[in-house]
Image: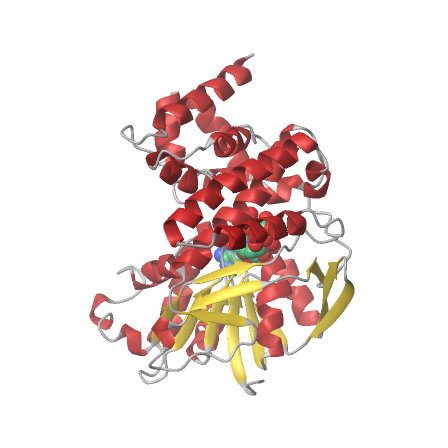
Amino acid sequence: MAVMGKKAVHFGAGNIGRGFVACFLHNSGYEVVFADVNGDLIDKINATPSYRVIEVGSEGTSENTITNYRAINSRTHEEDLVEEIRTADVVTCSVGPNILKFIAPVIAKGIDRRADENPLHVIACENAIGATDTLAGFIKDARNTDPERLESHHMRARYANSAIDRIVPAQDPNAGLDVTLEKFFEWVVDKTPFEDVGIPSIEGINWVDNLAPFIERKLYTVNTGHATAAYHGYNRRKRTVFDALQDKQIMAEVRGALTETKNLLVAKHNIDEEAQLAYMNKIIKRIGNPHLEDAVERVGRAPLRKLSRKERFVGPAAEAAENNMPIKYLLDAIEMTFRFQDVEGDDESKELSTIMSENTPEDVVAKVCGIQTTEKIYPQLVDIVKRVQADSEE
Ligand SMILES: NC(=O)C1=CN([C@@H]2O[C@H](COP(=O)(O)OP(=O)(O)OC[C@H]3O[C@@H](n4cnc5c(N)ncnc54)[C@H](O)[C@@H]3O)[C@@H](O)[C@H]2O)C=CC1
Ligand SMILES: O=P(O)(O)OC[C@H]1O[C@](O)(CO)[C@@H](O)[C@@H]1O
């Protein structure tokens, strides 16, 4: 059911922002105010009264037209944005997990100006476990919110974690604001923080009491599988994820990694093995969508984030290793990720290269993967780093 007269502020007018979150907010009757730092994109949004969201897949193509939006530059028009947040119903974001700290100050100011009886609903839509909690942590930090106002903060804002899943590749630069994406979507949000104040009416959200199994299943299946294909593909000079999956050896690596995460997910969350197998097969089909033209560099972007402790490779591999479960394919994928260095347009891949050349293997594992010497996976990761460093020196 559409909710008329409601307003959402969405940080990050990029692929997921325009193509997924804003589309659902629009279809639910919200006016969407985009906040971004890309001046050209903001001008384009404000000059274009509508754009299309184009779903592509083997079942054919369908379109949604999005209207009723505006955009504000959060760098140059902070005061305007604070006022929008003061009067908004919902704040969402899809800026990347590492950017959350930069959007927190303006959100904190907007929340602080709100009346006590009307809490803002905040939902971060990033590929990360607990991204809304991370954002809330920055908002509530003493640098952004007066500690004396913290006790009543819950009357002005509520925070719910989410898991968001839809493949939105890099867009054709000539497509304007239009976004082409896959048909499939999943947006799961923890409903418990909103229960006493009312759940926002947003079509398409699956509201749940316990998000943990959903987000781990998503991150350790969709994102593990997608990134495994991308990193192996990059190292074998494939252009897209579709191309990578045509290679039997890469397909075997993807299936191997997803079988290892399946074993962990089934054991940990009591997920039915057959259901997880079916989910895994569906994901392999989705990431191999020939209509998406998804470059391996996009899917492999930000390797330092993807090699971190709670992420799609080291997260499940460390846990599986502690439980004496096989992790061969996850380790292969980790090695391919360490080899994703100096990639054009990807700052983290350049930083990874510097870290690899300036640190001992032990320090790399501690710094990049956050793994302790006492963990079972530690020596295997050190061996991987040694191998990659040796190859770089040749
Ligand atoms: N593209 C995809 O298929 C999916 C992406 N995600 C997640 O969504 C998030 C965004 O991904 P994409 O939309 O693909 O990236 P994107 O690069 O297309 O969009 C990010 C947007 O954030 C903006 N931005 C950067 N710093 C900002 C700041 N300080 N304030 C406001 N805006 C800022 C950028 O200018 C850009 O427009 C990531 O966390 C990603 O993991 C989640 C599921 C699927
Ligand atoms: O920045 P990240 O973590 O790669 O997020 C984008 C990824 O999310 C997914 O869309 C899955 O939902 C992947 O297809 C895509 O590569």
Q: In this image, 136 relative to 2: left or right? A: left
Q: In this image, 285 relative to 374: left or right? A: right
Is residue 38 visible to the viewer in this orientation of the structure? no
For the point 54% across and 16% down, which residue is it?
391
For the point 37% across and 30% down, which residue is it?
377
Number of callouts? 0
Q: Nearer the viewer, residue 133 or 375?
A: 375
- Where residue 308 appears, as percent x and y from the top left, is 42, 40
- Where residue 276 appears, as percent x and y from the top left, is 52, 52
Q: Toward which corner of the image does residue 156 lie, by quadrant?
A: bottom left
Q: Nearer the viewer, residue 327 or 362?
A: 327
Q: Is residue 371 above or below residue 37?
A: above
Q: Toward which corner of the image does residue 394 lie, by quadrant?
A: top right
Q: Is residue 144 above or below residue 323?
A: below
Q: Check the image and tell me how it is coloured.
A: secondary structure
Q: Toward which corner of the image does residue 226 lie, by quadrant?
A: top right
For the point 69% across and 32% down, which residue is it?
248
- Where residue 149 appears, as percent x and y from the top left, is 24, 72
For the point 57% across and 31% down, which residue is it?
340
- Where residue 208 appears, as percent x and y from the top left, is 42, 69
Q: In this image, 232 relative to 327: left or right? A: right
Q: In this image, 178 relative to 7: left or right? A: right
The quadrant the N terminus occupies is bottom right
Q: Residue furthest bottom?
A: 4
Q: Nearer the viewer, residue 113 or 9?
A: 9
